[in-house]
Amino acid sequence: ECPHSSSTPNIYMTDAEYGHCCRMERKGLRYILALPDIPDPLNGGIVPAHVRYFHNGCFVQPDKVDEMDTKDVYLAMYGSVEEHVKQMLHESGLMKHFLSQVRGGLESPDRLAILDGNGPGLLHECALAAEELDIFRIGAGVDARHAGQQPNLRGPAWIFFGKDHRSPRQNFMQKRATFRIFNPGGIGTSEEIFIALTDLKTLAVLPTPHIFVDPGELRGENAHIWDDTDRQIQEQIGRGTSLDWIRRCCHFVDSYDQAAAIIHSFIADPVQYWQSI
């Protein structure tokens, strides 16, 4: 049982603590996180007292452990924590439409799961859409309460890292993701993009589509939010300091429909995709 006070559970792990839990799990030890009734700072209300099992690297509701083991198509969702982005996505229904479209195009829809940063803004909208559509979701959060970012304590599975331990959180998402979706975001999302591309370059992960989405419904008359990122990658290729196949794994699109089509195309024939890059 993880130590906690009566009001604030100690759910934020250091790199060393997380590594220890993973090693002990591989040896057959099961950690149980016992949570009291706690206020839900993001969704409102109270999160009722419950327990979670440490399973496959995160804390999972006991009745969801077996379901989690059936998932092998993971969308890693990155994006802004700002509330106005969530509101635009919610009012337009774009996130729900995207997740529904991706699932609908899979031969085995129950394979799909979502990974997100388990925080506010776009990440919260992603969580709400997944819950409404009954899509399994893992939240991988970092303690950013000092910056006004509240954690999402709901959902079937989650893991939280301390504010000085962003690296294991990113590694957690990278090692599980099948597809990486970079939605409209800011500085934090930019950091996550180049960590992901570094893992791609070093072949720490399989070469799969990295999709950069900025739908016209959100940006209006503005340029694509990731245009400068694309130019930077192409400038590096032009100077011979980066590899051109990495750019061919990056897909800059104007709609979630285009993003879903790229995902379905890869799943239908990954060998053809790899040959094309």
Image: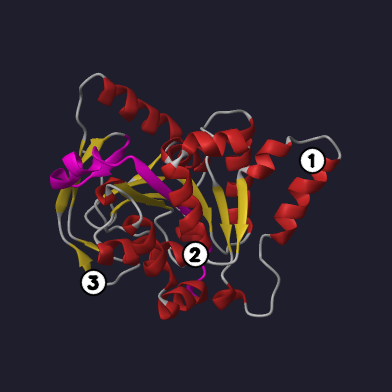
- Mark 2 vs mark 3, CA separation in Å: 32 Å
In depth, the one of 85 and 48 nearer the eye is 85
Element assignment for label 3: loop
Residue 16's tag is none
Q: Which residue is mark 2?
A: 256
Above or below residue 209? Residue 199 is above
- Mark 1 vs mark 2, CA separation in Å: 27 Å
Instruction: Residue type at mark 3: give it.
Output: Gly
Name which residue lies at 41% across and 64% down: 98
Instruction: Residue type at mark 1: give it.
Output: Ile
Upstream in the sequence, badge 2 or badge 3? 3
Instruction: Residue type at mark 2: give it.
Output: Tyr
Above or below residue 15? Residue 238 is below
List x then y, in percent, for residue 11: 32, 46
Labels 1, 3: front one: 1
Element assignment for label 2: helix
Residue placed furthest toward the right: 239
Upstream in the sequence, badge 1 or badge 2? 1
- Mark 1 vs mark 3, CA separation in Å: 51 Å
Question: Within the magenta stretch, is there residue 60?
Answer: yes
Residue segment shown in magenta: 57-83
Q: Which residue is mark 3?
A: 45
Residue 237's tag is 1
Quarter of the image for residue 162 reads top left
Name which residue lies at 68% across and 80% down: 221
